[in-house]
Image (spheres, rainbow, N blue to C red):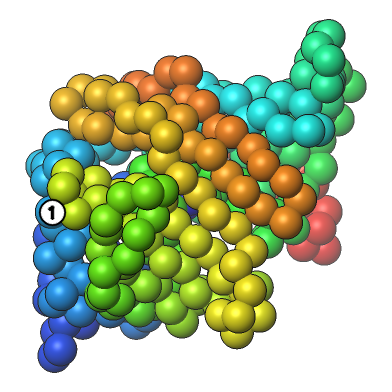
Amino acid sequence: MRCLNTPVCLAAASTLALSVSLLAGDDPGSSTDPTQVTPAAKEVIDRAINAMGGAALFDAVQSVSFDCEMENAQGTMLMTVMARNGAGTIMNQSLIPPGGGEPVNHRVLTATMNAGWARDVESGGVRLMPSGVAASIARAGDQWNFLRTAMGQFRMVDHDGPAMFAGRECTRVRCSDPRTAGLQTLTLYFDDETGLPLGQETATAAGSLISGIARIDEWQTVDGMMIPKRIAVEGQTGTSTLTFTRVEFNGVPASAFDMPEDVATLLVASAG
């Protein structure tokens, strides 16, 4: 889920321009590496965006902050996330062990446009994050935005015909040619009746293995926009539930991403 704005860039020729920016820090496409969205797929996506509140509302979002909980067999991960267009993403996370108790492993993970670092809250220690880990933290800022999370990781988006998902008739949109290592394809499912996205499947191993299924179980309305409240995720390691308990827009200051002195010192040392 990368974080914030910058429009989805689409090539001309056989594709149409997607009229919305789906919010998140890095482009899902750029002028040199545009995302291709076919006209048939664009029609489905435009209908979904309208059903969720319309392009104008999404385009007006410059920052987001939210609280969410990821529950699975390993416990409950508590996350507070802040993301701002052109600045980065901050994730404050801790874990409640299975059976309850006080949160442990409290860390603050930060990914800006230039660097990524992790700070242990208990000890105060800080370390730089590898670029791949920082990119994952950046995508975390898009967890509230189901379409951006999916489409931003692929170069090609195409209509893939009718299907059934979660017991409902729907239309399938297939994303291929991934920007993220390890992915092969991702399939989005859109409800034929409401136009809303129902969920997605992620495939690896050249498309032969379904490695993850995410299903939107509940929606909520925030500032006129419909966004997921609860998402069920089924993967190779089991089942998880992601619940958004708070979502707020356009309240994150740029100063939240100022680089601390100890991180700047680490960066200088690593460059030497």
Instruction: Report the side of 208 relative to 267 (left or right).
Output: left
Count of numbered circles on the image = 1
Image position of 52 with respect to 248: above or below:
below
Identify which residue, 173 or 112, lies in the foreground: 173
Check disc 1 and report its element: helix, strand or loop: helix
Quadrant of the frame with the C terminus:
bottom right
Q: Which residue lies furthest to the right in this view?
A: 123
Alpha-carbon neighbours of circle 1 within 10 Å: few (<14), some, or many (≥20)? Answer: some
Identify which residue, 259 or 141, lies in the foreground: 141
Q: Which residue bears the numbered disc 1?
A: 47
Q: Quadrant of residue 107?
A: top right
Question: Which residue is pictured at 21% across the width and 31% down the height?
Answer: 225
Instruction: Report the side of 184 relative to 159 (left or right).
Output: right
Q: In which quarter of the image is residue 65?
A: top left
Q: Is residue 24 visible?
A: no
Q: Which residue lies furthest to the front in this view?
A: 167
Residue 4 x %, y %: 37, 46
Question: Which residue is pictured at 89% across the width and 21% down the height?
Answer: 123
Residue 98 x %, y %: 83, 22
Question: Which residue is pictured at 48% across the width and 37% down the height?
Answer: 231
Image position of 210 with respect to 36: above or below:
above
Q: Which residue lies furthest to the bottom in this view?
A: 13
Residue 199 x %, y %: 41, 51
Q: Is residue 218 visible?
A: yes
Q: Which amino acid does label 1 sit on?
A: Arg
Residue 93 x %, y %: 68, 27
Instruction: Report the side of 15 relative to 89 (left or right).
Output: left
Question: Which residue is pictured at 31% across the width and 50% down the height?
Answer: 168
